[in-house]
Amino acid sequence: MTSLQKGVRKMMENVKKEFLLGRSYPVQLDEKMPNTHRWGILGSGWIASCFSTQVIKAGGNIAAVGSRELKKAQEFQREFPSIKKVYGSYEELIKDPDIDVIYVATPHAQHHEWAMKCLQHNKPILVEKAFTQNYKQAKEILDLAKEKNLFVMEAYWTRFLPHIIKVKELIDRGEIGDIVQIIADHGVYFPFDPKHRLYAPELAGGALLDLGVYPISFVQFLLGNPTRIIAAGSATPTGVDSNDAAIFEYENGKGTLAILAFGSLASSPITAAICGTKGRIEIERQFYRPSDFTVFYNDGSTFEYVSKTHENYEDGRGGLFGMHFEASEVQRCLLEGKVESSVMPWEDTLSVMKIMDEIRRQLDFKYEGETL
Ligand SMILES: NC(=O)c1ccc[n+]([C@@H]2O[C@H](COP(=O)([O-])OP(=O)(O)OC[C@H]3O[C@@H](n4cnc5c(N)ncnc54)[C@H](OP(=O)(O)O)[C@@H]3O)[C@@H](O)[C@H]2O)c1
């Protein structure tokens, strides 16, 4: 290739890169959150602390925290001194008329109870993933929200992250052609501890609800609902699932498949590859957190998306970062009078719960008192 040809090729690559970077899926990606709503935090655990760090850093207003113990709420306030009110019960938080929206950050087994109570007291809610234990509980919450015309969103923060928004945009406009396969995994080693929420059946533990929900909701976001699911998995001595895989089949005329693996007994790459007829997108570890990706085209060319996530969002304390994007979406929806987000709609939450019920049905694994 002559130097002129090389120069032209470089120029064309740059033009293409500018073009690919220049458009955006319709979600705002404000680094700053306006202080329009007073958030209440329900449950003062690890994720509540990550969420509060990010929201406060972005300019949002965490106004109160409720814990089952006043002492723990006070400890949380010491970590975040801008929080004005602390409550030694969730009920007091829910009844506070000065709270506009509540973030439910308890283990899965408590999501249904507290989400319902929040709605009964007319509070809009953002509920941590997995939204509930099963489809039935999710439906009850969303039926009540519909009846009371109140906002509810599952806190599947991945859908609001810059790199995922870009991936969705590229796929929607056919950049990699028709999707043939998606391969995604989420394995995190958690030493076995029967009391840990991941292994405790009474807290609705298990790899599926905790870790599997990430690749499942990711695939559901890109491909919709599968027509067939084939699942395999094994359980821990406490009886919750711990090492699972699933294949989703789509009768979309293209024979599309998704291959997912998730578990708590070993750490896995935590990457995602979306393979299409014109090329593939590889999202780097950890795909569900702020990350980078590369598009590999069939002609050998590539496009790299670098989100500079660590410099931009890292909180310096080993927690999750980038959670303010989902919180911003909640505030935008509330300002616009919406009851659901178009990016994480109720229908998708219900579909994800239905998929997880089906996987558990195939693994023959139920939580106590449950019918699937
Ligand atoms: N978005 C993400 O990436 C992400 C990451 C990790 C976890 N999560 C989700 O966040 C939720 C909480 O996880 P976490 O890691 O924050 O758990 P955690 O550290 O154990 O905190 C959960 C909190 O829930 C409250 N709680 C209420 N009832 C409880 C009970 N019976 N047993 C134990 N705690 C109870 C406790 O707060 P008080 O003592 O203050 O009442 C506890 O601190 C889960 O739904 C999980 O899947 C999301």
Image: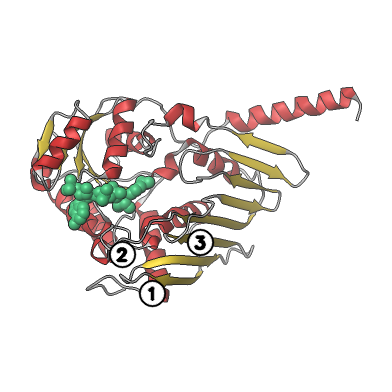
Q: Amino acid at mark 3?
A: Ala
Residue 219's x, y, as percent?
50, 55
Residue 241's x, y, as percent?
38, 68
Q: Residue 172 bears which disc, if any?
A: none
Q: Secondary structure at mark 3?
A: strand
Spatial separation of the CA atoms under disc 3 and disc 2: 20 Å
Residue marked by disc 2: 134
Residue marked by disc 1: 361
Q: Amino acid at mark 1?
A: Arg
Q: Secondary structure at mark 2?
A: loop
Disc 2 under 8 Å from ligand 1? The reply is no
> Which of the 4 quarters of the picture holds residue 73?
top left
Q: As rendered, which of 256 and 206 lies closer to the eye?
A: 206
Residue marked by disc 3: 261
Left or right of 185 in this view: 358: left
Q: As rendered, which of 277 and 67 lies closer to the eye?
A: 67
Q: Secondary structure at mark 1?
A: helix
The relative height of residue 206 versus residue 22 in the rendered view (above or below) is: below
